[in-house]
């Protein structure tokens, strides 16, 4: 007789297809973190003086902070002095794509992201970030005609300092939390988007992050500002080579939506998850927050998290404007020894604010998946509503799913709904599919995709297909 | 079409089938009857490829191929269909998606072109109409929240859609009221044809009033102890299984 979980377990051997290393000459800062490191980064980026000061303030504050321990993820202590905080390909892109190192273009091509505008998916503009710098941004000219700014963060700091200074740290202050404060001190690159009043951004904006260099951390910073009545859909993707060491990724994303503006932010997170025994992989400690500042503003987070050894992130919304809407749709997959502690916070401040949370956790192998959610209805938020749905799917009998929903209601007119479920892919379900001609792998994919469909339908079309494929690859293995 | 020779099957340490022999030809309907625990469902499940059972001896030849060496999905694609006694619920997976995946898998094996979403919908709606099943089924998750009768009808519907060559009905009649039984029996009768064989595993004679079998076999303690025509079923209905079990025991003792 076969062990009832063996068939399912045979799916959970990982096959990470993005684990190659690009051989390229790099300018890497020596490991270690002190004020000089920060001055070096700031100088490399030719930053204005005020930004360096802001970084140093953050650093000094960080020295007084302790790494958090409240999360449900376990890892050996991180040595912050052993990390290199800056790595950049030596030949830097300047005016046009022609000047980008062909080795870099090949890297992105291999990742399925051709940076050549002719070959690109029409309707998607890409900013490609390689270690600490942005190497190329496509369709900049076309977007500029509409007044849209889409450029590397470091470029924005030089060319649009008034906007950066006004909004940087306005959603995630430099004192926010251990990892966000570290990021504020040492952030290198990321994307900056500005959508002017009344403009509907005609294409998806997308940033593709790649960690390549060894022993470096990636600390990117993304800032998106949507002026009144504007609309933007933004997508980020990320991968890293397979290395035996753990690498730290601590990003900060800030979104600001003014009156009647909408920001849709989608993530397909596919950092290297480590091997079967949990060796290597990215530590992903990310702070993402959006401010629905204006009336009727709308921020929607969608994330598909399949990578990283550790995922620690809670994309959140501060619903300040009356009638503003916050949404969080998430699929988090943990396989082998991966750990994820992820969820969201919805802070209702304005009147008639609404939020929706749909979280789908899939655990396989020895994976540990935690949903952590906070919904706060402040006294001022009359007529606020929240709907939370939190589902877990278990594959095999060695993984775990945990749920920590926190709800705090200070206004009696609030409507709160919370639904949760836990299910397991059963051997009998697989057999039933088999008996109808469907292979074991297709059966698992069918069930997993069925489980995730409420989230996938929030993704832009092309990426929904991508996400489905990614999930099936992450669960791929020989059929037992 | 199907030749079962001296089939021995264990579940754990427990011998369930102890030398089953059965030959089924295309166009025939066989009914396998027997008391609870006699191994009827085990036989159906082993034919479908359930891995929780271990075949210790014997062979099963289906269309000239060794059936026991084929994976469950290969058997399904080769035309072996089992209607489950307890159809499984698959929450979140829309029936339409499930049926399309199944139909296209079977079509690939038959060398037919796969159907796209539109072609599939046209075909499936036609089949639904013939069987009088509500189109809403397509949007519901596979078997989730279905009543017992709905589940059994869904099995018959899938069978009609996939057009298998060998249909194994595992106690499809159990737990049905008389109206549902009639609908299910109609569905099975519609499947009868010169190219297709049907094995009807059942505890009761009642469904045989609607689906008249060509052959009836009685399974007792893992062996077929008696075979006959449809009148055998009536005899069992009248006298119960007791006499045949006693006869079987005497025979075993005499043989030993």
Image (cartoon, rainbow, N blue to C red):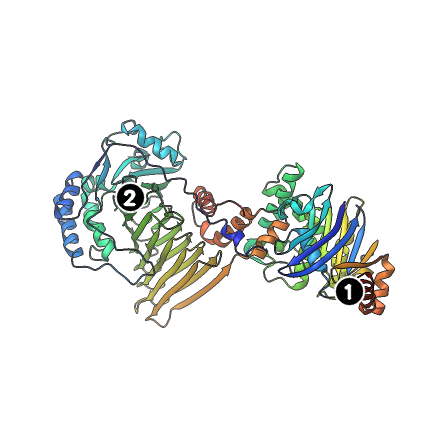
Q: Quadrant of the N terminus of chain B?
A: top right
Residue that carries the numbered disc 1 in the rendered image: B204
Position of B51 relative to B254 (above/below): above
The residue lying furthest to the bottom in this view is A412
Image mark for residue A55: none
Say few, some or many: other residues with alpha carbon within 10 Å of mark 1 (under 14 / 14 to 19 / 20 or more).
Answer: some
Measuring from the top left, give residue B48's x and y in whole percent.
67, 51
Q: Position of residue B98 (x, y in %)?
A: 59, 50
Check chain identity for marks 2 and 1: say if they share one: no
Q: Which residue is mark 2?
A: A193
Q: Which chain is indicated by disc 2?
A: A
Residue B210 appears in the picture as rendered: no
Observer-nearest residue: A251 or A263?
Answer: A251
Question: Can you see residue A344?
Answer: yes
Q: Residue A30's image quarter?
A: top left
Q: Percent x, y for residue A54?
A: 15, 50
Measure how far apart labels 2 and 1 are at the Cα level: 72 Å
Furthest-top residue in this view: A98
Q: Which sits in the foreground, B23 or B55?
A: B55
- In the displayed structure image, the side of residue A336 where residue B203 appears, left or right: right
Look at 38% across and 39% down and name the residue there. Answer: A18
């Amino acid at each position: 007789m076969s062990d009832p979980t063996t068939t399912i377990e045979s799916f959970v051997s990982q096959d990470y297809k993005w684990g190659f290393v690009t051989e390229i000459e790099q300018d890497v800062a020596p490991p270690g973190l002190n004020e000089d490191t920060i001055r070096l980064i700031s100088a490399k980026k030719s930053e204005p003086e005020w930004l360096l000061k802001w970084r140093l303030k953050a650093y000094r504050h960080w020295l007084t902070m302790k790494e958090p321990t409240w999360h449900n993820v376990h890892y050996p202590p991180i040595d912050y002095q052993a990390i290199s905080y800056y790595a950049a390909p030596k030949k830097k892109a300047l005016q046009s794509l022609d000047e980008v190192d062909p080795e870099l273009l090949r890297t992105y091509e291999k990742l399925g992201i051709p940076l050549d505008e002719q070959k690109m998916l029409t309707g998607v503009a890409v900013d490609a970030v390689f270690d600490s710098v942005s190497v190329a941004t496509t369709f900049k000219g076309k977007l500029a005609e509409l007044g849209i700014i889409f450029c590397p963060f470091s470029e924005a700091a030089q060319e649009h300092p008034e906007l950066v200074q006004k909004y940087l740290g306005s959603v995630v202050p430099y004192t926010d939390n251990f990892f966000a404060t570290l990021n504020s001190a040492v952030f290198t690159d990321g994307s900056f988007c500005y959508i002017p009043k009344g403009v509907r951004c005609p294409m998806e904006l997308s940033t593709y992050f790649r960690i390549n260099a060894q022993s470096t951390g990636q600390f990117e910073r993304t800032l998106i500002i949507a002026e009144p009545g504007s609309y933007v859909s933004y997508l980020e993707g990320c991968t890293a080579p397979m290395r035996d060491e753990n690498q730290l990724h601590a990003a900060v994303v800030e979104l600001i939506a003014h009156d009647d503006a909408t920001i849709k932010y989608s993530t397909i997170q596919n950092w290297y998850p480590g091997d079967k025994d949990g060796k290597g992989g990215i530590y992903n400690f990310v702070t993402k927050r959006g401010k629905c500042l204006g009336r009727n503003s709308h921020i929607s987070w969608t994330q598909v998290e399949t990578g990283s050894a550790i995922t620690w992130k809670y994309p959140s919304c501060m619903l300040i404007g009356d009638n503003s809407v916050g949404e969080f749709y998430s699929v988090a997959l943990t396989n082998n020894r991966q750990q994820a502690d992820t969820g969201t916070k919805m802070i209702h401040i304005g009147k008639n604010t609404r939020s929706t949370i749909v979280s789908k956790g899939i655990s396989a192998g020895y994976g540990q998946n935690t949903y952590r959610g906070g919904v706060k209805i402040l006294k001022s938020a009359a007529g606020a509503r929240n709907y939370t749905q939190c589902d877990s799917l278990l594959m095999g009998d060695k993984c775990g799913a945990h749920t920590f929903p926190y709800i705090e209601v200070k206004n009696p007119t609030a409507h709160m709904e919370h639904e949760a479920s836990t299910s397991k892919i059963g051997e009998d379900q697989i057999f039933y599919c088999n008996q109808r001609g469907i292979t074991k792998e297709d059966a698992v994919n069918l069930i997993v995709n069925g489980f995730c469909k409420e989230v996938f339908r929030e993704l832009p079309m092309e990426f929904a297909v991508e996400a489905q494929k990614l999930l099936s690859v992450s669960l791929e293995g020989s059929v037992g | 079409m199907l030749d079962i020779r001296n089939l021995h099957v264990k579940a754990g340490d427990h011998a369930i089938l102890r030398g089953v022999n059965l030959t089924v030809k295309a166009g025939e309907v066989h009914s396998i009857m027997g008391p609870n625990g006699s191994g009827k469902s085990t036989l159906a499940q082993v034919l479908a490829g359930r891995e929780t059972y271990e075949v210790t001896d014997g062979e099963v030849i289906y269309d000239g191929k060794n059936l026991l060496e084929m994976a469950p999905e290969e058997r399904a694609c080769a035309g072996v269909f089992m209607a489950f006694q307890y159809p499984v619920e698959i929450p979140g997976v829309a029936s339409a998606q499930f049926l399309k995946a199944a139909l296209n898998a079977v079509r690939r094996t038959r060398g037919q072109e796969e159907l796209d979403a539109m072609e599939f919908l046209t075909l499936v709606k036609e089949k639904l109409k013939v069987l009088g099943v509500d189109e809403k089924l397509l949007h519901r998750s596979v078997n989730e929240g279905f009543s017992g009768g709905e589940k059994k009808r869904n099995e018959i519907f899938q069978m009609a859609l996939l057009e298998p060559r060998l249909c194994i009905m595992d106690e499809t009649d159990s737990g049905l009221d008389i109206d549902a039984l009639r609908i299910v029996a109609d569905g099975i009768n519609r499947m009868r044809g010169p190219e297709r064989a049907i094995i009807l595993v059942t505890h009761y004679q009642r469904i045989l009033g609607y689906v008249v079998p060509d052959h009836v076999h009685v399974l007792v303690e893992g062996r077929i102890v008696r075979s006959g025509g449809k009148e055998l079923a009536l005899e069992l209905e009248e006298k119960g299984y007791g006499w045949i079990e006693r006869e079987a025991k005497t025979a075993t003792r005499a043989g030993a």
